[in-house]
Amino acid sequence: MSTKQTIAVIGATGNMGSNIAKNLSRGNNRVLLFANDKDKVNAVVSEIKSNNASADVEAYECPRTASWEADVIILAVPYQAEKEITAKIKDVANTKIVISIANPLNETYSGLVTSPETSAAEELQKLLPNSKVVKAFNTTFAADFSIPVIDGKQVDAFIAGNDANALETVSALVTTVGFNPIVAGDLSVSRTLENMALLLISLTMKYNYNWLAGFKILHK
């Protein structure tokens, strides 16, 4: 059995955060959940334990405490909220893996608020210079976590980062939640991944994919 990891999910009551937490709790992980609404966090914990009584999951009232205890920190918050959260956890996130799932979308979902020369993940790395920031889960919809196999094909989840060990760790987490991990490159590739998410959202809205859609690289 693999070594148990402690994973903090910051923003654990949103669609993405709660689904990530639910799926990670099925693996050999200790999962620490934080969000601003304590009652909603407790509801997520109760739902997880009702489906899996042996799940090692608990609610935390402080993002800093949850992050301090964690090996891996997942920021499941909007891009605009990352600066405030990172200010609270910066000193306890040193040398740790911090996963960026955010897509820096504008209000109309017609473009990104970041310039073409950067990405949400790279901006997060600037805020946390001593952490190992990895981009992951941004190209998957929340609904995909309950149905990671669509039309008989396992959804691919793309990963980008600069640290080889961190990429390996995150790839294992992606596998745990049910997706096929693909390491796409270093952190600068996040610019492409965030534009891929924008494209998928645009296509979903145009063709009514019902928010159950994902990317798949077909090859032989």
Image (cartoon, rainbow, N blue to C red):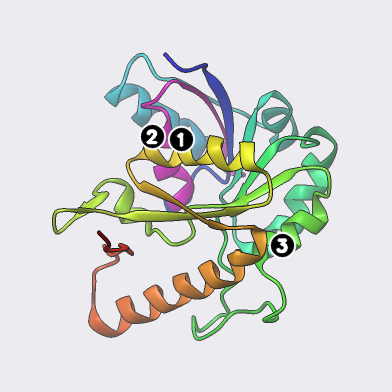
CB atoms at circles 2 and 1 under 8 Å apart?
yes
Q: Is residue 98 magenta?
A: no
Instruction: Determine the image quadrant of residue 92.
Output: top right
The residue under label 3 is 122
Residue 214 lies, in percent from the top left, at 32, 63
Q: Position of residue 144 (x, y in %)?
A: 30, 53
Which residue: 32% across, 41% down?
Answer: 178
Q: How far separated are the C-alphas under marks 2 and 3?
A: 25 Å
Q: Residue furthest left?
A: 152
Task: Using the numbered discs, state the Cα–Cα distance from disc 2 to disc 1 in whole angstroms.
Answer: 6 Å
Q: Local crowd at mark 3 within 10 Å, few (<14), some, or many (≥20)? A: many
User: Which quadrant of the figure contains the C terminus?
Assistant: bottom left
- The residue that disc 1 covers is 172
According to the picture, the residue beneath numbered tag 2 turns out to be 176
* Residue sitting at x 30%, y 62%: 216
Does 215 sit above or below residue 166?
A: below
- Which stretch is magenta? 16-38
